[in-house]
Image (cartoon, rainbow, N blue to C red):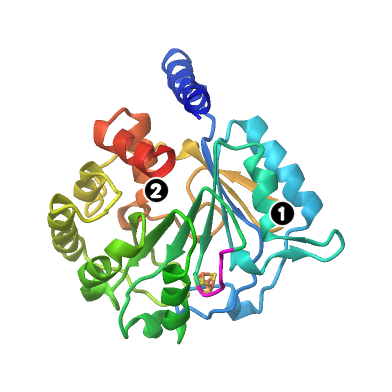
Amino acid sequence: MILKKIKQLSYFISFKVKNIFNRKYRKPLLAGIKITTKCNMKCIHCPFWRDNSSFYMSWDTFQETVVTLYDNGVRILVIEGGEPMLWNDEKYKKDISDAIEFAKKYFFYTAITTNGSINFNNINPDIIFISIESASESYSDIRGDFLESVLSNIKNAKNKKIIINITINSVTYKDVVSTIRALNESVYGFTLQFFYPYQGLADLRLSATRKKNILDDIIELKKQGFKILDSYDALRKMPDNSWRCDDFLVSSVEADGKITNGCYLKNRAVQISCKDCGFFAHCELSLAFQLHPGALCAAKKIFMD
Ligand code: SF4
Ligand code: SF4
């Protein structure tokens, strides 16, 4: 275990050192892979169900992509969707647990982002991120009637590192504090994100002032010991996006295997609006790369502890 951590730490240190001496050393560290676009929910802000998209990455493509990402420098993989728990490959009789176990052979950390409505006790990633905007009635305004099953799956989870990822938007922003209070004892922690307005979809964005007010409340909760994993640095810089984005640290993979390096919005948004950026993950990663102590501690807490 200790040897594994030393190996991981030396990779991250040499990554930074190489970058200091060679500005062209621009490799990704983290990748998100959309293993399927199929989902059992119909969230109001989501593009996938609108075009009846139900594309499954093939097992062959998944394996090839994992190897390519690893060779490109990626050491943290997040498997996402759609709903990744629905993924399978009939030809090879593989399901999501096979995909996770395969990825774990390569990456330091393999995580999954799920909507949490399907029991996840049969999978064993390093982290399970569950997307919840609110733990009260307004949940259904965004996602439909799934809250009960999600909360029951969290309650019955066995030995899982569960992190609730809250996307703060104009419908559920009033519930963020109560949601953190309600779920604090049941999960490993919370990460945040602000809604980003994609063209043609419901616009649930918040003003910079409202974002700041909410994050001030969340900073108070963090000071009181609630398990907010985002750093104070990020919590203070996200409302007006006063952080420097090193987006080369991230890669995204579509369900057809196409890899894009850089901002999550590339090839997804018609126009990228950095002033509306709500991606705490990009912010934390950039700040950690720029050696901000709080973001380094947040990365350690999320992945290494
Ligand atoms: S759970 Fe995720 S993929 Fe499914 S509809 Fe909602 S936002 Fe889209
Ligand atoms: S939208 Fe956010 S993540 Fe994308 S380039 Fe702009 S600041 Fe970076």
Q: Is mark 2 within 8 Å of ligand 2?
A: no
Dot 1 falls on a residue whose secondary structure is helix
Front-most of residues 184 and 170: 184
Please count the marks in the image. 2
Q: Residue furthest top?
A: 21
The correct choice, above or below, for 223 with respect to 298 in the image is below
Disc ID at residue 281: 2
Of the residues shown, which amino acid type is indicated by label 1?
Asp
Q: Percent from the top left, x then y, of residue 257?
A: 71, 51
| Residue drawn 14% across the image and 62% down it | 213
Q: Answer left or right for 121 relative to 289.
A: right
Q: Residues within 10 Å of mark 1 (few under 14, many from 20)?
A: some
Q: Residue furthest right?
A: 91
Q: Residues within 10 Å of mark 2 (few under 14, many from 20)?
A: some
Q: Is residue 91 left or right of residue 89?
A: right
The residue under label 1 is 98
Residue 29 coordinates in the image, percent (x, y): 51, 35
**Which of 44/203 is in front?**
44
Q: Where is residue 52, by image quadrant?
A: bottom right
From the viewer's perspective, is the residue at label 1 or at label 2 nearer? 1
Q: Is 273 situated above or below 197?
A: above
For the residue pair 159 and 219, the one nearer the viewer reads as 159
Q: Position of residue 187 (x, y in %)?
A: 36, 60
Give the number of the disc on residue 70.
Answer: none
Can residue 88 be found in the magenta stretch? no
Is 288 drawn above or below residue 280 in the view shown? above
Q: Residue at x 34, y 73 (%)?
A: 204
Distance from label 1 to label 2 (Cα)?
A: 26 Å
| Residue beneath the point at 62% across and 66% down | 85
Disc 2 secondary structure class: helix
Query: Residues in magenta?
Result: 117-121
